[in-house]
Image (tube, rainbow, N blue to C red):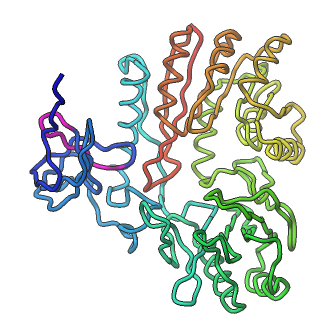
Amino acid sequence: MSKIQAPVMKNEYYDVTFEDLTHEGAGVAKIEGFPVFVENALPEEHGKIKVIKVKKGFAFGRLIELYEKSKNRVEAPCPIYSQCGGCQLQHVSYEGQLMYKRRQVEQVLMRIGKLDLNKVKIHPTLGMRDPWNYRNKAQVPIGEREGGLVAGFYQKRSHEIIDMERCLIQQAENDDVVQAVKKICEQYGIRAYNEEKHKGWLRHIMVRYGLVTKEMMVVFVTRTADFPHKNDILKKITMQFPHVKSIVQNINNKRTNVIFGDETKVLWGDEYIYDKIGEIKFAISARSFYQVNPEQTKVLYDKALEYARLTGAESVIDAYCGIGTISLFLAQKAKNVFGVEIVPEAIEDAKRNAELNGFTNAEFAVGEAETVIPEWYKEGNKADVIVVDPPRKGCDEALLRTILDMKPKRVVYVSCNPGTLARDLHMLEQGGYETVEVQPVDMFPHTTHCEAVAWLELV
């Protein structure tokens, strides 16, 4: 069989009309049905591209000129947007972003989930009133340039750090502390970690901020356990920022791009800071998983609670419960809640958070959801409602099979990846569930990430 020739050639120019966006935010044009992906292009735009790479079933292009612009195109306000890899959609109006995210959910539910959208209600994406300065955690790599320290996100497709003083999606308080800590470290000659040579000391500065409580934690991620000029540096930070309640050091001596190492120690203040989502208070440690957009987290969890349709008589299982955030929202209206999570530290946090808020109807277990929940089922423990909030890879097939065996009357699926949501909904639908509604929620404005909550009923 002869090899099919792609209808485009590398380094050639083409006039195209863009039809769609990929899940990474690139524009999609088709030349004789052959898809070409182009950064910074939007649906309904017409322009000239240069093909820069041709693969077996698709190609990549570079935008050369726009003849006709989308009504959703805006000027990105961030001065380093074209270099930085943190945001992908600042050149899209916020209304346009919400529309594209809903469309992304619709497309995968049809294509992968095989859902009939005439029967399933896909709501417009729930966005923010002010979609800027929302991130409550700054996690910034540190490097060196021309004898000084630089702090910022990595450049697109590289490990070159873009030095920045302000990030428009970070809370301003975090930016202030990161810049101040960087300058204090410079004053004492602190050396940044060099990943190529595996030398230097300071790898990352992380700052966590409680939006409601205004409490702040500073975390130094270092290559070695020593801390040069520790007392002087800590004194300067606490004098300059009285709302800092905790300063922590995490030691990561491995050659890795994973941020945290295994050892964490409190240098000053408390092990935890606190914040609230709605009426529920949470203790947050250096390594706790805590949603970075607390305003939209409440929107997301309120929707999950609404879809659970609790009357106070139900037993609920919360798979992938983390530090108990969704579990405690559910515990407000459920008879009892059983949470499971693979990370032991997260379960300790969940138990602490339940005690902190006076919940006696929430219990937590360590282990894989796909292992623990089947064991509960064998022991005769059944749930009226199961809530899942899995990582990006979606639910393990063994967990989905247990749900189908257990037959709770209702499943609420909280997803950070529409593609795996669609795949898992398809399996649940084949096993006797019906998807009633799906609500996209914009947790990360100006990025391509989209969360969604799905409500399923046993037929």
Quarter of the figure with residue 312: top right
Q: Estimate the x, y position of residue 209 in percent, counting from the top left.
A: 69, 65
Tell me where the magenta segment starts and ends, as one range. 25-34
Q: Is residue 47 above or below residue 169?
A: above
Q: Estimate the x, y position of residue 451 in percent, counting from the top left.
A: 52, 40
Picture residue at 14% right of the left edge, 44% below the top: 8
Q: Estimate the x, y position of residue 231 in percent, counting from the top left.
A: 85, 85
Quarter of the figure with residue 59: top left
Picture residue at 46% right of the left edge, 32% below the top: 419
Q: Quadrant of the image for the N terminus?
A: top left
Please indicate whether residue 47 sits to the left or right of residue 286 in the image: left
| The magenta stretch spans residue 31 | yes
Picture residue at 73% right of the left edge, 36% below the top: 321
Picture residue at 62% right of the left edge, 38% below the top: 302
Q: Is residue 297 above or below residue 423?
A: below
Please indicate whether residue 408 sits to the left or right of residue 428 in the image: right
Magenta segment, prevailing SS (helix, strand or loop): strand
Q: Residue furthest front?
A: 1
Instruction: Give the camera-side residue of 287 and 389.
Output: 287
Instruction: Give the camera-side residue of 420 and 329.
Output: 420
Q: Estimate the x, y position of residue 64 in percent, counting from the top left.
A: 16, 61
| The magenta stretch spans residue 158 | no
Q: Residue furthest bottom?
A: 187
